Amino acid sequence: MDLLLYIAAGYLTFTIAVFTRNWFEFRSLSEFQPFSGSRKSAPLVSICIPARNEEKVIETCVTSALKQDYPNFEVLVLDDNSTDDTPVILEKLSGIINNLHHLNGNEKPDEWLGKPWACHQLSNHANGDYLIFIDADVWLEESAISKAVNALQKSDVITVWPKQKLKTFWEKLIIPMVYYGLYSLLPARYVEKVPKWLPKSLHKKMSSKFAAACGQFLAFNKEAYNKIGGHTSVKKEVVEDVELSKVIKNHGLMLSMYDGVGTVNCRMYQSHKEIFEGLRKNFFAGFGKNTSLFLTMTVLQFIVYVLPFYILFTGNSGQQLFAGLLVAVILVQRWMLDFKFGWNPIMSFLQPITILWYEILAARCLWDHYSGKKAYWKGREV
């Protein structure tokens, strides 16, 4: 048991170093000033929204995009063969708003997955100097596009991790772990710049290892988008945003990450079923379907984030003190993120339950992979 506590302590020591860096270096899009030029001097921005079976959220998303204070933009929404009332809602909106372009998607080719195909079609219709792809469950504050344009003056591509709105118990329990993993494992600065300590001979080969992106808000200057081949380069990828980030880095382009507090909001899922099915389709794929790495991280997560809570109540006095320190580190990190993103800090005490939920998800993903069972999302096989 003592050995396992030492393993947990070593892992958390690493997360402390990464988390501390990210706390100061993971910038917010809200820090940028809004675009201050005239419409004549403002580059055209194409806000591209793929939508399939999004009747619950599409109107909020589209209306927020249309209310931007940026002086020169177009909004393109592609109905990707929805089977709900999404096309009806879009038809109603496009009938009263001139700046909205409602597109009907073509049938998906077999060699494409749904979202890359929808985004590819949107890019073919976009006229902007900048292409900004947002998901249909995202809504923007009025200055979001204006600030994104200024951020794009410093990078070829930017990605924004939205402020996640959490309403149900399951959302509050599960979604924050995505951000906790991001903040505690990947230095945001390394997404933008190759680490100085890495030998120059390995810079190009290793740059994609430090790549990450959030497909809920991904913005390109058009030259960079064309250089990487757009979404054609990731047409078969389930986790297309992460794969795009690798392609971007491999082409020597600059990618910058920001948080969306005050600018970009999202509610990813609205029920436990949606959460499980949504993460089921991409959890294992996010590890490159590397079973060894996936299993190693699954075991590590249990040792680090479940075991100390258990030993805190069952171990001897020395073990309890050690475990208490580890639990304190976990809770402080979680509370800092709760404060930043406006989440309920009480849910952080349920961290072991959160991890056990992900362990069940991991088991299901492995079962799917080795049994050949396919996941479904928005009525399509993934």
Image: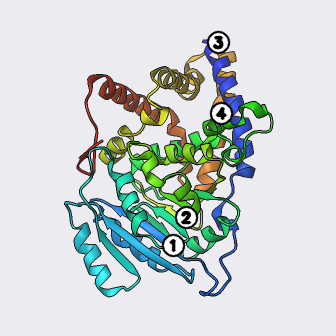
Amino acid, disc 4: Lys
Q: Nearer the viewer, residue 269 or 213?
A: 213
Q: Nearer the viewer, residue 227 or 135?
A: 227
Label 3 to label 4, Cα distance in Å? 35 Å
How many neighbours does mark 2 have within 10 angstroms: few (below 14), some (14-19), or many (20 or more)?
Answer: many
**Is residue 200 rendered to the left or right of residue 79?**
right
Q: Is residue 77 among what the camera can see?
A: yes
* Residue at the spot 28% in from the left edge and 65% down from the top edge: 55
Q: Nearer the viewer, mark 3 or mark 4?
A: 4
What's the mark number on residue 128? 1
Quadrant assignment for the C terminus: top left
Q: Earlier in the sequence, mark 3 or mark 4?
A: 3
Q: Nearer the viewer, residue 186 or 37?
A: 37
The residue indicated by pointer 4 is 205
Amino acid, disc 3: Leu
Q: Is residue 329 among what the camera can see?
A: no
* Residue at the spot 54% in from the left edge and 77% down from the top edge: 44
Please state the horizontal and vertical placement of residue 49, each as a whole percent of the image: 40, 65
How many neighbours does mark 4 have within 10 angstroms: few (below 14), some (14-19), or many (20 or more)?
Answer: few
Q: Earlier in the sequence, mark 1 or mark 3?
A: 3
Label 2 to label 3, Cα distance in Å? 52 Å
How many neighbours does mark 1 have within 10 angstroms: few (below 14), some (14-19), or many (20 or more)?
Answer: some
**Is residue 376 rendered to the left or right of residue 135?**
left
* Residue at the spot 80% in from the left edge and 34% down from the top edge: 197
Its colouring scheme is rainbow
The residue indicated by pointer 3 is 3
The residue indicated by pointer 2 is 222
